Image: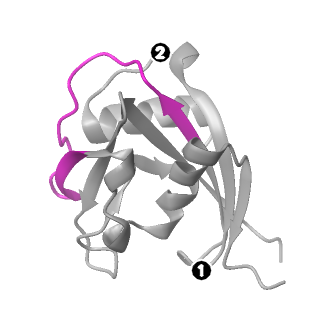
């Protein structure tokens, strides 16, 4: 059997020293936890195209591809049924004001100072990309046995 990996994209929307997070609404252990705008790539979709689409779908902003910068890749197992690769992008430029466009999946959006993130309720997978923004780490692994 061929191993499969999901590929998902995460977007760090940065405004000065603040980061936009979404409070997840779900029927699992992540309900009420904070995370980045994110989602799975669709068939035939590039990472940048997926990040742009997810940002628009979830928070209503339009991002020019030239304004996205890939900052991190995370190889994760244990955050779902299949292993996944997460591509993290950051931007400081977009059009539109962020709004919660998926109230069935998110309770609210909120800007957090990078120095005062809700660490106790932040999904650890999102933390990899946030840490990359702060430290410059380009790759991480979570859940793999060594």
Label 2: how many Cα within 10 Å (few below 14, some 14–19, many 20+): few
Taking depth in this image into account, of 122 and 81 the one nearest to the observer is 122
Q: Is residue 136 above or below residue 91?
A: below
Task: Using residue 50 as the reference point, say whether residue 114 is left or right of it.
Answer: left
Q: Which mark is residue 135?
A: none
79 shown above or below 118: below
Residue under the image location 26 percent in, 30 percent down: 60
Residue 16 in the image, given as x and y percentages of width and height: 35, 27
SS at mark 2 in the image: loop
- Residue 45 visible in the picture: no
The C terminus sits in image quarter: bottom right
Snapshot quadrant of residue 20 = top left
Q: Which residue is mark 2?
A: 64
Magenta span includes 70 = no
Task: Note whether residue 83 is visible.
Answer: yes
Using the numbered discs, state the Cα–Cα distance from disc 1 to disc 2 in whole angstroms: 33 Å
Q: Position of residue 63 (x, y in %)?
A: 42, 20
| Label 1 SS | loop
- Which range of residues does the magenta coloring cover? 88-111
Pinpoint residue 80: horizontal percent, then vertical percent. 53, 76
Residue drawn at (32%, 71%) of the image: 121
Which residue in the structure is indicated by mark 1? 78
Q: x and y percent of residue 112 in the render?
A: 28, 47
| Residue beneath the point at 83% across and 77% down | 1
Left or right, residue 143 beside residue 67: right
Q: Within 10 angstroms of label 1, few (less than 14), some, or many (20 or more) residues?
A: few
- State left or right for residue 120 relative to residue 4: left
The residue sitting at the front extreme is: 115
């Amino acid at each position: 059997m061929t191993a499969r990996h999901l590929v998902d994209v995460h977007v760090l929307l940065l405004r000065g020293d603040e980061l936009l997070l979404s409070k997840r609404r779900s029927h699992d252990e992540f309900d009420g936890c904070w995370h980045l705008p994110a989602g799975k790539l669709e068939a035939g979709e590039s990472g940048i195209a997926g990040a742009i689409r997810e940002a628009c779908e979830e928070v209503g902003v339009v991002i020019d591809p030239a304004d996205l910068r890939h900052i991190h890749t995370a190889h994760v197992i244990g955050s779902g049924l299949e292993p996944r690769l997460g591509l993290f992008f950051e931007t400081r430029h977009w059009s539109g004001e962020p709004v919660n466009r998926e109230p069935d999946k998110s309770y609210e959006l909120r800007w957090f100072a990078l120095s005062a993130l809700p660490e106790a309720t932040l999904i650890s997978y999102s933390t990899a990309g946030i840490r990359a923004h702060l430290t410059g780490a380009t790759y991480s692994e979570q859940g793999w046995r060594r």
